[in-house]
Amino acid sequence: MLPLFIIVPLCGAFLIPLLSRLWKGLADVVGNLVGAVLVGFAVYGVAALAGGSLPAVYAMGGWMPPVGIVLVYDSLTALVVLITNLVGFPALLFSTRYLDQYTGRWKYYSLFMLLLAGLNGVALSGDMFNMFVFIEIAAIASYALVAFGTRAEELESGFKYMVMGEVGSLLILLSVAMLYAHTSTLNMADMARVLQAGGLTPLSWFVLATMLVGFSIKMAMMPFHSWLPDAHLSAPAPVSAMLSGVFIKVLGVYAMSRVVFNVFGLTRSVAPQFFNLLVGLGLLSIIAASLLAINQKDYKRLLAYSTVSQVGYIVLGLGIGNYWAIVGALFHVLSHAVTKGLLFLASRSIERQTGTREIGNLGGLERNMPVTSWSYVLGSLSMSGVPPFAGFFSKLFIIVGAVEARMYWPAIVAGLFSVLTLGYLLKVINNVLFVNRDRNSSLVREAPAPILVALVMLTALALAFGLGFRPVLDWIVNPAAKVLTIPLTYAQMVLGG
Amino acid sequence: MVPFIACLLLFLLGLYAIVLKRNIIKIIIGFSLMEYAVNLLFAFIGFKQGAIAPIITRLGMTQDFVDPLPQALVLTSIVIGLATTALMLAFAMRIYEKYHTFDITEIRRLRG
Amino acid sequence: MSRGMTVIVQSVTRLVAGMLFLFGCYIVLHGHLTPGGGFAGGVLIAAAFILVSLAFGSVENVEQHRYTFSSVFESLGGLGFLAIGLAGYLAGHQFLSNLWPKVGEPLTLFSAGTIPLANIAIAMKVGAGLFAIFLALGASRFVMKD
């Protein structure tokens, strides 16, 4: 069961170039089919994990750990795989109508499938080097996808993104090399045993530092964020949704927290300096990116800066490091993935129908595009933490965690800048959707059906995560937070005892 | 210890080229340097004095092998490096077609 | 544009290209016994094709066909590798399990179960992929037009 998460998109990636030679439309069909199947697998995986009927460790080729390569499916992996595929399927559905302007759709779908395979692989891999390989698969696919339009600006931002992303990847590879030199194993659980028995040496601090920089580039944390706004501006909207919603969380947040919490076994009491650094970086991202977002005139760039600031919340939650803060961070991973994906798709739907991205040129779209507009409104409300949406609970848990850890300033900053998020998102909602009806020509029509279906799906998910936060918390987030807060369970689960 | 420091120096040299050089081709060469530095580090990690290459040419061999795992990892990372270098060169070519220059200070059509 | 390079290069290519191709095949087929394997052999095979392409040149039509062929072969190679992996899975073992690990004499050509088959699939993928990269970089004017 577990390798199918990787095999199915890979099969799709290799089948699409062949089948689309027979008939061009098959690329859409196969791509969306794979997306739907993966959603089914991910949901089944969560249910099976809750029921205890899924083997959590899968030894590839029958070679047992620590020698062989393993796939590990624990609660944290389940959460990450779930968001990957829940956002991936609507993005694929959106792509069917989005790609009308481009030639070579099979290349797009093939790359998108590789991106999905890479993201699922990062989440599932229980082996350090394999995780790096999947990171690279996802990253290379995303570089090519960002520059897919091959206009001058798109190539420029794609190259910029690629340079920064590759520096991050090579830093990660360097730290994997040093971890191997230090522990003589690549299996993450085995590595955790060796590292936790040996304590923190100067070498482990060096490895942690290079890893932190590498993953920070991948998750666009504040000093390393500069690739993200440009990449979002030029990427196709479904790719933006994947990048902002899933990519930076899987490659950055998930991979880093897996390494920091489960492999190094760090907790706040062991390494307070490291966690304070995370809190500082998180606060920097929240504050600076929010302030940058307010002044943007282009609503896609505004959303990109808002992503940087929301990642700050996640890192803040991880940095606070107690149970509620981590629950909040993981819940924010879940809610932000869905809502930011929704916002990017909705804003592209507006751009597609009106032909502009300037906030100042738009107005009163609510009358002509009700579905797009209301999904945008609901997404914005969830993003900025208005009850009873998903974003409210995630930020609430982070603030509760901060107060519990007696970090009052971070709690206050998180609360205040959540209001600021509402402010800049309301600016867009108000100007673009409701007032200035005179700017709107009555010729603007609602987007075509596949786009609306994608938007409605994501809106429904955002609402469901908010209104049904109790079951989501019980089944998905709490078990995942337990994986992170009890560092030793991971090694015990994989190696058995 | 010396080989490891040499690898790190090579890595930093590549980083220097990426950060400070203005020509896109030189930046790509910087990436190749960084990759080779990490590959070399892997090779050093697996090295053992007096051991032979890890290939079984007959049954029942008793000599010491060098660690074969880093070699497999190097091979994988070479493949990844091939893909990234090819993609970067493709980017460089398309950028040259659009901007008619390899100088990154002149490739600034995006603001911010 | 005159096609290809000088007569010297072309004659040497005629001599060498076939041997390069054969040597690549040898490296692939003996991948489970000697250094090398799917990737190294695939690169050699691609090198043979690239050499021919460079020495004799080509026109847009031919280039398009070569690109189509190499792209199809690349996909087939990838699918082949997945099929070998899935064969182990469908036979009731784990994904990528070796189906017949004990078949054949150890250290001879016919041994090691599905590993040589996987090597061949990888060689197809790598050889065709590398050749496609070469075509795409060297002839982006033709190929990228789709």
Image (spheres, coloured by chain):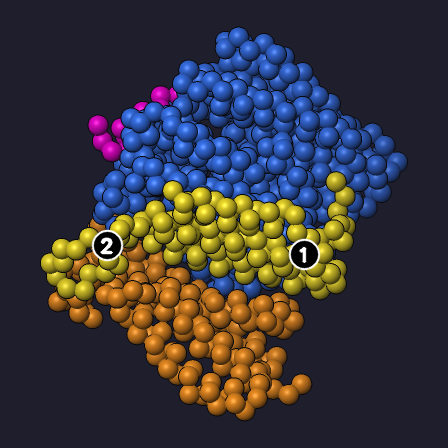
Q: Which chain is orange?
A: C
Helix, strand, or loop for circle 2?
A: loop
> What amino acid is at disc 1?
Asn
Whether the magenta-drawn stretch holds residue A484 is answered as yes
Could you say which chain is coloured blue in the image? A
Q: Quadrant of residue A42?
A: top left
Q: Which residue is mark 1?
A: B23
Q: Residue at x 77, y 43 (%)?
A: B111
Q: Percent from the top left, x then y, of residue B31?
A: 55, 53
Asked whether the viewer can see residue A230, the reply is: yes
Look at label 2 and name its amino acid: Ala
Across and down, in percent, residue C87 comes to 27, 57
The yellow one among the chains is: B
Residue A55 among those drawn in magenta? no
The magenta span reads A483-497
Residue A151's place in the image compared with A373, above or below, is below
Q: Is residue C119 above or below residue A233?
A: below
Q: Residue at x 52, y 38 (%)?
A: A214
How far across and down, in percent of the image, does residue A320 sit?
50, 18
Is B102 on the left-hand or right-hand side of B16? right
Q: Is residue A453 visible?
A: no
Q: Earlier in the sequence, mark 2 or mark 1?
A: 1
Q: Which of A350 and A121 lies nearest the eye of the viewer?
A: A121
